[in-house]
Structures are given as C-alpha cells and as structure tokens.
Image (cartoon, grey):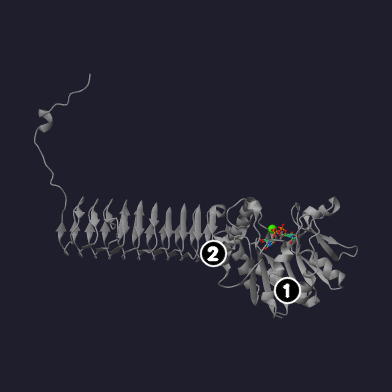
Amino acid sequence: METAAIILAAGAGTRMKSKKPKVVHEVLGRPLVRWVVEAAKGAGADRVVTVVGHQRDQVIPLVEEDTTVVVQQAQRGTADAVLAAKEALADFEGAVMVLSGDSPLIRPETIAEMAALREEHNAAVIVLTMELENPFGYGRIVRDGAGEVARIVEQKDATPEEAAITECNSGFYCFDARDLFSALEQVDSNNAQGEFYLTDVLAIARAAGRPVLAYKTSESAQCLGVNSRGQLAEATAVMQKRINDAHMAAGVTMWSPETTFIGPEVTIAQDVELLPSVILMGSTSIGEDSVIGPNTRLTDTVVGCGCTVDETVAVEAQIDDGATCGPRAYLRPAAHLCEGAKAGTHVEIKKSTVGKGSKVPHLSYIGDTTIGEGVNIGAGSITCNYDGVNKHATVIEDGAFVGSDTMMVAPVTIGAGALVGAGSTITKDVAPGALALARAKQQQMEGWVAAHPIQKKK
Ligand code: UD1
Ligand code: CA
C-alpha cells in the first residue's frame, strides 16, 4: 500500500520564547522538522507533505527540496493543519501518517511498525502512545470499559480524573486516507483552546464504527515533543546518547560521551579516539586511528587516517593522513593539510594548501597560499594577503625555508629551496635557491652604555 506522510510544522511555538519558528531550532545541528522528514523517508513514505504557516519563510527553505510544501494560513489547530494538506493528496489512496514537526526523536522503524499494524487491522487510525510519569501537557488516551481507545482529551480540557491518566498521545498517527479526510470535516473547535484538534478524529472514526487502535511504545523518549528550551535540551541529550552509543558500538573510543556532540551525518572510522569536549558537525568524517580533541569543533571537515587534531576549530577543511593540527589551530574554509603536514599552535589557515610534510608550527596566518612539499614556515610568519580591497596569492615552493617573523606581502612567490632570513618583509619574488634578507641593518656603538650612565631616580 502507498503511504504518504504529513508533517505538521505551522505552529508558532510560543513556549520557545524565540524570534525563530519552533521547528527551525536544531538538535545536533539538524532542524527539528528535518529530523521528522528524515524519519518519514526512513520509514518508506512515498510522498511527504509539510504543512507550514507561522514564519514560513524560515521553514520552507528547509523542506522544499524533498517534500511538497502546503500553507496553513491561520494556525487554528492540528486538524486544520492536516486539512491544509488535503488538496496536495487529492489523488492519493492509502495510508497517511501524520507526524509532529516538533518531535525529532521518532524512529523510522516505529513509524513503519505503525503503518504495518494499521494495514493488518484495516483500522481507521492507529495512534502511537506512551506511558509518562509526568504526563502534563500531553493529550491523554481515554479507553472504554473494554480497554479500547475511545478518544483523546487534551490537557486543557481534561477533568481531574482524565488528567490522572498516564497513557499519552505522542502526536504520531497512521490513518486510512479516506477515514481521515471524511472525519476531519466533522471536527469542531468547541474546546478550551478554541482550536480544531486532530485528536478528535479518533472519537469520530469510532462513532462511525471504524476500528481505532493505539500502539504503545516502551521507549517514551522517542515521542518527546519540543515545546520549550528545556525540552530542546532534553531532546539533544537523548539524540546525543543515541548517536554516541552507535559510534561506540562501531569501534570508536570516547573518553567522555557526555561532552561529545556528533551530528547525524558525521562518519567516524574504527579505532578513532575522541577526547573530551569534541563537537563534530555537518558532513565531517574521521579516518581510522585519528585522535581528536580535547576541545575541538570540526564542521564539514574531512580528516584522514592517523591524524592528531588537538584543540582545533576547523570549518570546511581537509586534513590528510598523518597530518597534525593544534593545539589551538584554526582551519577555515578550503584549508588543506596534505599528508604528514602540520598546523601547530595558534596557527590560522584559510583557503591554502600546506604540501606533504610541510610545517607551519607556531603563531602564523596563512591565507590564499599554496605551500609545496617539505617547506618550513618559521614562528610568527604571516602572509599579507589583503590590501584592503583585494585578496592576493602567495606561493611557497618545495623545500623553501621561511625564517621566523617573515611578512610575505602578496602577490609573491618564494622559489623552491630558497631561504628567507628571519624578520624579513618580502615584497618581491624570491628566486629558487636564493637567500633573501629584507630587514633593517643592525647598528652597534661600542662602549655606548658605559658612556651614558642611566640616572637612577632617588
Ligand atoms: C499535540 C496533541 C497532543 C499530543 C502532543 C504530542 C493536538 C490537539 N494535541 O499537542 O494530544 O500529546 O501534540 O506532542 O493535536 N501545528 C500546526 N498548525 C496548527 C497547530 C499546530 O501546524 O494550527 C503543528 C505545530 O507546529 C507542531 C504540531 O502541530 O509541530 C503539534 O502542535 P502543538 O501546538 O505543539 O501541540 P501540542 O499542544 O504539543
Ligand atoms: Ca507539541
């Protein structure tokens, strides 16, 4: 049977106290709504429709590429939100999952299980439920004398007896498309919030004599809805543990999983060691036997095998096999350390290649530069790549030796095997094999100190 998924992401999320819409807030670098889109796709949904509304200009760019976007003009409740997707699914027959865009922890397997159960029982709807010690805020599952699901009552509409129920609505459902859209026509807004509740569809379907089921998960954490910053932190902690456990199971060592934060798309090879306080985000990948951290943040960065990356921040950088980095290095976009190269302490590198085995060990800025193989850059050397208007390139050829505290004013080339004296300001190309010195001559006056006794204050 074909399955469609409708993701509800039109609400404001006032409890977040934010200028951003709720579903744009991120868990481990991925927006809440994207987690749900990925879960729907992972569960095998053939079509995904995202309902947007409040501040939709910020939500649409996140979902327009791989889902059908529909607009709910006014946020009049979850039933009204689902109705906004009706037209987009006009030609659709089959199962419709409705997923809360603010619940990032849902597992694709769970969605798939719900879909299979609904089909097996030909039910109008199956709702995912969970038992919570503190159910406050969630809709409660009201069962009849026979234990069948009768209806769902929202927190604000619940009598004290209903509020004492601990089985809660997760906000995830699988419907038969026909039952869903016909029941939605009958939902009204006679309730404490004056909203059209999707949850009312259960009682309506039951009254029509159609089977209504609940599927209770034993892992209530996957149903956590993010309504506040506290719940955002809770969701982050759960996802962090889930991801870290998977990497450890696959052969990654973590000194302190609690201080290790890894995004969902990061790949890490076997026998990598992560020291405390490491953040790996985006499309970052780490090759075998590399040691990362402590205090390191890598975003969209490719690290090869056997690298040491210590107290480093890197964004869109590439660190090849056996290269070393830090402590306290900053690799900016298009920084590339080739095999066995080194970017040492307090070194910043941007849009530059450091060739095989070349070293920039201390206190340097290298920008818009191509460094060949076997080059040594002395402490405190800087490429002066920016004249205030344009950026210019520096080339340092194989085997060159640049003395400490050298300023290389770009555009400039230092030839293969050349030697630049410490403290030089290089403004002209240096020929291969040449010695270049560009510094003021030292003056020396013999006996000057004795002839000029310093007057000490009394
Ligand atoms: C909802 C359920 C509740 C359940 C809980 C689980 C209803 C009436 N209540 O409550 O039973 O326990 O989720 O997390 O459905 N949205 C829209 N348009 C709207 C209103 C909401 O798109 O007009 C979206 C929101 O962006 C959000 C989702 O629907 O992603 C749920 O809305 P929210 O206001 O968070 O519902 P809850 O009060 O949490
Ligand atoms: Ca919610």
Quadrant (top left/top right/bottom left/bottom right) for the C terminus: top left
Name which residue type carries label 2: Gly
Residue 401 image offset from top left, x and y in percent: 22, 58
The residue carrying mark 2 has its beta carbon less than 8 Å from ligand 1: no
Nearer the viewer's eye, disc 2 or disc 1?
A: 1
| Quarter of the displayed picture in which ligand 1 can be seen | bottom right
Residue 203 horizontal side relative to residue 379, left or right: right
What amino acid type should be assigned to the residue bearing mark 1?
Ala
The numbered mark at residue 83 is none
Q: Residue furthest front?
A: 73
Q: Position of residue 110 (x, y in %)?
A: 70, 68
Residue most toward the top? Answer: 458
Q: Quadrant of residue 436?
A: bottom left
Q: Residues within 10 Å of mark 1 (few under 14, many from 20)?
A: many
Q: Gap between marks 2 and 1, in whole Å?
A: 34 Å
Q: Is residue 170 visible?
A: yes
Callouts 2 and 1 close, C-beta under 8 Å: no
Rendered residue at 68%/58% (across/down)? 225
Horizontal side of 271 relative to 382 (left or right) equals right
Residue at the location (70% across, 78% down)? 90
Neighbour tally class for label 2: few under 14, some 14-19, many 20 plus, Cα within 10 Å: some
Residue beneath disc 2: 251
> Which of the 4 image quarters holds residue 220?
bottom right
Could you tell whether 401 is left or right of 326 in the image?
left
Q: Label for residue 115? A: 1
Where disc 1 sits, the SS reads helix
**In what element is the residue under mark 2?**
loop
